[in-house]
Image: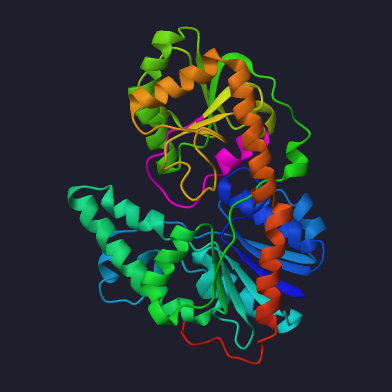
Amino acid sequence: MRILVLSTWWPEPDDNGSRLRAMAILRGLAERHQLHLIAFSQEPTTTIRTTEISRLCRSWQVFERPDRPLSLRDRLGSLTSSKPASVRVRWSTAFAQAVLDAANRWQPDVVLALQIDVAPYACLVPQIPRVLEELELAAILEDYRNKHGFHRLRSLLTAIQHRRYIATILPSFAAISTVSEKEADLVQQITGTRTPPLVVIPNGIDGKACAAYSYHPEPDTLIYPGALSYSANLDAVSYFLYRIWPLIRAHHPMARFRITGKVTAEQQALLPAANGVEFTGYVDDIRAVISRHAVEVCPIREGGGTRLKILEALALGVPVVSTSKGAEGLILNNGEHLLLANTPMDFALATSRLLSDPPLARRLGEAGRQAVLARYDWRVIIPRLEEVLTEVTKQRTRRYDLAEA
């Protein structure tokens, strides 16, 4: 197949959840199909890496993503518009023209849109089936529930606007994928009988790449991988440092906790000063760093989707302690593949248990590794996406421009 891929993120390097998923999809599809990629970049296009993308894709184009802050006027305009402010204000005419030009020149068999941000650009291409990959709604709705006062009202308006917009745009797609059954249920609730075929394509890991590492932990070390620019990560680390870390240090006074990923001085200032805590900043080889830690903690309390950080740690044989929210959507058993804890005391006790019993930690990590490789290896997952793409191309004569972008 000739697949025109539109991506919200420039996938290289694959150093966050969205990039990891996008790159894994490109790697998997490139083995048997021809790819043309058009993507947004959050960084200046002059600084991006292109080595692997050039190998995977027949051609590619990249555009800096319009990302100016939304004004109050922008948000109020959403009350009368069918499109959210983020769609109206951050529209890229250059990106849209590139999509039209590529479709006319390349004549793809299918258009694959990675995340909702590029969905309206996919809708510009007529008479070619479109697939929307990784539609995520839970985070938008939860943002409203977690806010208070004026911010709660603003988030409510955003949630209502997105629900209305999504219900309008989704019928333009031949199929939609989500990362979990919960997300699929939300899509069904919003679109009702007009829902296109839904398929769950979970997040995954590169089992072959992870096999190159082994679990050799430093005693009494914990890790949380995730940039604090993402609000769910900042909340998780704040919760851990304020409520859980003092309880762990009381039993393990030499314990160390490392947070990887980009962090600003302003973000660090929001967190309590604590002994034994280290911010590593960006690391080139996150797998090597994770595999040297005794336990990965995932004290997530908000956000949607499924946690690549849990899958990656378990694929490396590193035991995980998580909240139920952090492990939401993953088919893993508490006490068999990982430990779940939903109060500060329970979380601290579960973590302390693994630090105090290295053989138990190793057994739990190995059981988690086996479960993840069997169900969440991209080599198992990508064929499901290929089946969807193949099926919709058989229906090419049908028109999918039921809604205007």
312 sits left or right of 350 in the view? right
Report if residue 317 lies within the magenta region: yes
Q: How is the image coloured?
A: rainbow
The N terminus: image quadrant: bottom right
Q: Nearer the viewer, residue 122 or 33?
A: 33
Q: Nearer the viewer, residue 373 or 5?
A: 373
Residue 75 in percent (x, y) is at: 29, 64
165 sits left or right of 59 in the view? left
Q: Residue furthest left?
A: 149
Note whether 257 is above or below 2 in the view shown.
above
Q: Residue at x 62, y 62 (%)?
A: 39
Report if residue 186 lies within the magenta region: no
**Circle count:** 0
Q: Residue at x 35, y 21 (%)?
A: 272
Note whether 269 is above or below 157 in the view shown.
above
Q: Which residues are magenta?
A: 297-318
Note whether 56 is above or below 339 in the view shown.
below
Residue 400 in percent (x, y) is at: 55, 86
58 sits left or right of 129 in the view? right
